[in-house]
Image: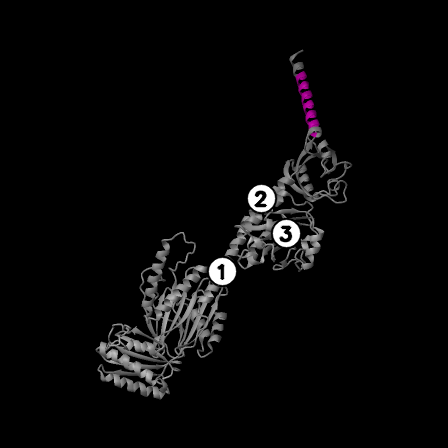
Amino acid sequence: MNASQDMTAGRDRGQDRGRDLDGAVLDALFADSPHPVYVLDTDLRLVGFNDAAGHFRHLPPTGALGMPLRQWAPGLHHEQVEAMLREVLTTGEPRSDFEVEHHPVPDAAHGAGLPHTVLSLAAFRLRDSVRGVKGLALSVMDATDRYRAQVRLEVLRQASARIGTTLDIVHTAQELADVCVPDLADTVVVDVLDAVLRGDVPPLESLGHDLLLRCAGYSSVRPTNGHRPIEVGSVLEPGLSSRYKQVLTERRPVLLGGPDGHEEAETHGKGNALVPERDAHSRMAVPLAARGGILGLARFYRQRTAAPFTEDDLRLADELTRHTALCLDNARLYTRERSVARILQLSLRPVHVPGHSAVETAHSYLPSSTSGDWFDIIPLSGARIGLVVGEPPTRGIRAAVTMGGLRAAIGALATLDLPPEELLERVHDLVSRLDAEESRHPDDTLDSRRAGTCCLYAVYDPVSHRCTLASAGHPPPAVARPGKPVVFADMPIGPPLGRGAPRYHSVRIELPVGTLVMLCNPVLLRDASPDSQEQLARLGEALHPENRPLPDIIKTILSDLARPHPTGDGVLLLARTLGLGSDRVASWSLPNKPEAVGEARGRAEDRLDHWGLSQLAFTATLVVSELVTNAVRYSEGPIRLRLVRDHAALIIEVTDDSSTAPQLRHAEDDDEHGRGLSITSQLTEHWGTRREHRGKTIWAELSQHAAA
């Protein structure tokens, strides 16, 4: 055999071996392959299938030879699948991992009762020996488990991003319901215990008595047609035999089948809270438990989805509810803290503001948060009045603690008649000292830092018609004098309390009778900048005319100037200045000599008789003589005596040039001196001393209704 014959024989043997290998591959593909394979012609008609396809219940090919795809596989999304197959025929590019849902037709052969599945398709083109396109091969795999695992992962991913975005209990419960529908369940109802909505968690032993659940979240694939079968806030009261109560008491998720007839009849009569029970073929109930307490219950239903819930679905629901329960508990704690802070704040701020001869006041308090902003009106000696507005840097209970402490401190220091700048300096030192003490205990859970609190303190004198103001980081008040444009008081702004050096300076401004003074925190107004001309113009429109009733002016300010959604509590204090004229004030300058005591008694008695207060003459002249006697004894310059007739009190003031503060002593029976202030304290309602630019003033108040 020559060389050419050897080559021809070798080629024939190679072709025979190739044909044998092709036949072996073809036999293995159709006889031994575990994956279903379908052969389609160029018109997508079924022309062959392997043994695995003959036993594949989702796409049974028996009796389907010669049928187009949409006839022998009606459960597939045929438009989507046919488009993919024709693309493979045209381009020759094989496709793999093409996932499509398969919904068996109930009346189709071998399809009744099968749940819907997810199939993974792979297709490649078939050619003959001359490279002609003869059709394509379609391989099919059941990818339902893989698809459901991907769906579970996606639900978990969405849950971590979408659940717990706020500290609102109802909103958080609704987020759980929205995340789970439709990927996990067709209908989800989230119920929370009624006590949780108030910020409490009932003890476990009480779950068997007076159990009350309220719907806090609901979502369903079923159309509502404008009416939701379950409304947020509706009540669910499981009976004693209810499986849901068992889930709560045992704190264990439960996988249920269809509705129990006895339970359905028992609970449906109490309202519409269990409407999903009627047509659900599969149910899950998972408790909402966090930090050792039970918060509520999550119910999952499937009505349209044919596949029942599985143990994997129950584990997924349990994981979702655990995450949601922590978010709900955070919202519950926030609700409780907010409620406690609100109650504490309302109890600490002035509820009733009595009338005063110095100013006419009106106020408004807008509780949009728990920021703890406050105001105060403090009666002072000499018929003066103190006006305070402040805002702490913290929120919640911390803000309430700060507000209560600083309000009490400012009130106590104000009664000492300290000038505004000195009062702020002392409060600044107090805040710094308290915060320094708390910083030594970093493990404290209650952070009640006060540093950064802003405060404005103003003192108005109705006799001199002057107002003295000082600020610690707070913007100046708006002033509307009669017939004048509105301006912001020109005053220096010191650092907030507890920050920086305590350097505060006060200013004294003239406020004629009828002047409006508006004090508010910056969060209330849209623009509280003193340089804002637009704001001044709008303030002018709101405050004028000044003789309008103050409640009407406040309504105008809140409607025209207030922010629609302030970030903190809005505090507004409006004061209209009044005055005490010569008919209510009497003042004399007396020489510093013993004869001044008798002169002071006589002038005081004449003035009281002129005012119709002769019933106070004995007591008042006794107090006058004691105070003037002390002034003569301990001072050198002239003495000033002033009587002020307030609404319900007679105010006696004696001013001298001595800066020595008087001391109340208890004299013995044989002492010749030391009884003056003791007698004064026993005969008067209040008494005290305040510093002047030179010397001091001792004052005392007598009730006009006191008997002689």
The type of residue carrying mark 3 is: Tyr
Q: Which residue is mark 3?
A: 244
Rendered view: 140 above or below 161: above
| Quadrant location, the C terminus | bottom left
Span shown in magenta: 8-29
Report the residue at 35% width, 87% height from top: 614
How far across and down, in percent of the image, does residue 153 sit?
Answer: 58, 44
The image quadrant of residue 75 is top right
Q: CA distance from mark 2 to mark 3?
A: 27 Å
Task: Give the mark toward the camera: 2 or 3.
Answer: 3
Q: Which residue is mark 1?
A: 338
How far across and down, in percent of the image, does residue 683 sit?
Answer: 34, 79
Note whether residue 246 is visible: yes
In-front residue for pair 557/689: 689
Report the residue at 45% width, 60% height from top: 397
Find numbered disc 1 in the image and state the secondary structure of the residue it sits on. Answer: helix
Q: Which residue is mark 2?
A: 153
Q: CA distance from mark 3 to mark 1?
A: 31 Å
Rendered view: 657 above or below 113: below
Q: Looking at the image, tell me whether mark 3 or mark 1 is earlier in sequence order.
A: 3
